[in-house]
Image (tube, grey):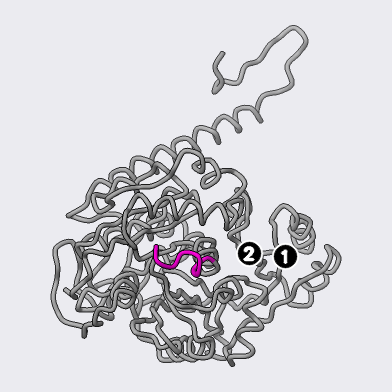
Amino acid sequence: MPSFATDVPALLLRLDPNPYHHGTLGAARSLGRAGLEVHALLGSTGGPVTRTRFLHRVHTPPHTAARLGGSGGCGALPDAELERLLLDVSDTVGRPAVLVPLDDHGAIATARLAPRLAGRYLLPAVEPGLPARLADKAELAAVCARAGIAHPTTVLPGSAREAVREAVALGLPVVAKWSRPWLLPPGLRSVVLVRTEAEAARLFQRSEEAGSALLLQRRLPDAPGADWFFHGYAAEGGRCLLGGAGRKERSWPPHTGLTAVGSWLPNPSVEQAAARLTAALDYRGILDLDFRRDPATGVHHLVDFNPRPGAQFRLFTDGAGLDVVRAQHLHLTGRAMPRAAVGRRRGESRGGPGRVFVVENYALLATLLGPPPPGPEGAAMARGPVERAWFAVDDPVPFAAMAGGWVGRCLGKGLRAICLRAAARQTKPSPHTERRNPCTTS
């Protein structure tokens, strides 16, 4: 185990109201197991993440709770209000803390606020506007072009008619993305597959509601083992102090969703692209890159740059127990970065390539409803050490809370579906007969 500055606490920041974000749980467990005092400022006050024994305290003051988890999306919280909130939390903690943003909005805002948070929080010395440029899907194509990184052909239509024309020119189906997904209200997905001209026009017409521009992207074909990612921690000059490439074995929703099962699988093409990009940008801090391989050329195209930990970051735990959030704490507190070692700690699987990460709830959906995994190579990776997103022997309560919550949600959705089908089957009642939906109550 590395030697951590245990007198320096950590604050996990996640403004997104999703209570089932397993990456936040992973960060709390990782830092808590290292002997650090872990605080969290979350957009959701309930849910299984808050049940972990490794969180010292969850901070959500009453006057901002509605704004953090409100229906207007996490973009509703202005920088000035976030600054006041972080300063209030700092007063409560009582000493400087390492700040770990876990969603795009938090990473973007804290980079801008870093000079004003100095002395209260330790943050990577990244250029203040860089995370916003990298997380903006419309900006990423230009960033990749300057750095010589492959990126799918991307256009920004200026009207619904132009969206139709560009979608046809790119070749339907195309990938549609909102340029600033952290501003999205509930009900709009950040990435969708547009299959028809009418879908392209309807989606563009929701631009004002989305709060950012719609972009259309050439769809690289689905292929076994095509989806890859890179997680790392970069220091001065964009040097990666820790990093690794992984492959999506299963995702949910299929092909465009998050990693349900992933393997740490070395890939020189992905690793070299990540190193070139971070060096060209002088990027500093935690990063999560998504790639898709074009089966026609074998080239890996960068499709997303997330300036914060990915939800499956615990996949990349080396033999010394080091992952990206631990690396950030060590680096920002001036501690030495240890060499990888072989071993196992309580509650943790062995480290290094070959590890597998499983998100139990999404893996179940992907297995039951999604396409088959990549094939024999992917099946072989499943025999490596497994890191589970929710279940941990030394911290079982979050898994139980997640399972109970998901069962309740599934039952609720099933009941609503039954009610809707029953209502649809009912004929229009006559003036003398009142029909009742069997799923309603008086």
Q: Where is residue 143 in the image (x, y as percent from the top left)?
A: 62, 84
Residue numbers of the magenta segment: 113-120
Foreground of the two, 136 or 430: 136
What's under tag 2, amino acid-wise? Arg
| The N terminus - image quarter | bottom left
**Mark number displayed over residue 213:** 1
Secondary structure, mark 1, is: loop
How crowded pointer 2 is (Cα within 10 Å; few <14, some 14-19, many 20+) is rated as: many
Secondary structure, mark 2, is: loop
| The C terminus - image quarter | top right
Magenta residue check for 376: no
Residue drawn at 38 percent across, 44 percent down = 47
Horizontal side of residue 298 vs 151, given as left or right: left
On screen, 337 above or below 44?
A: below
Discs 2, 1 touching: Cβ within 8 Å: yes
On screen, 399 above or below 182?
A: above
Q: Where is residue 239 in the image (x, y as percent from the top left)?
A: 40, 88
Foreground of the two, 250 or 316: 316
User: Mark 2 or mark 1: which comes first in sequence?
Assistant: 2
Whether residue 218 can be seen here: yes
Magenta residue check for 118: yes
Horizontal side of residue 175 vs 412, given as left or right: right
Residue drawn at 40 percent across, 76 percent down = 231
Residue bearing mark 2: 180
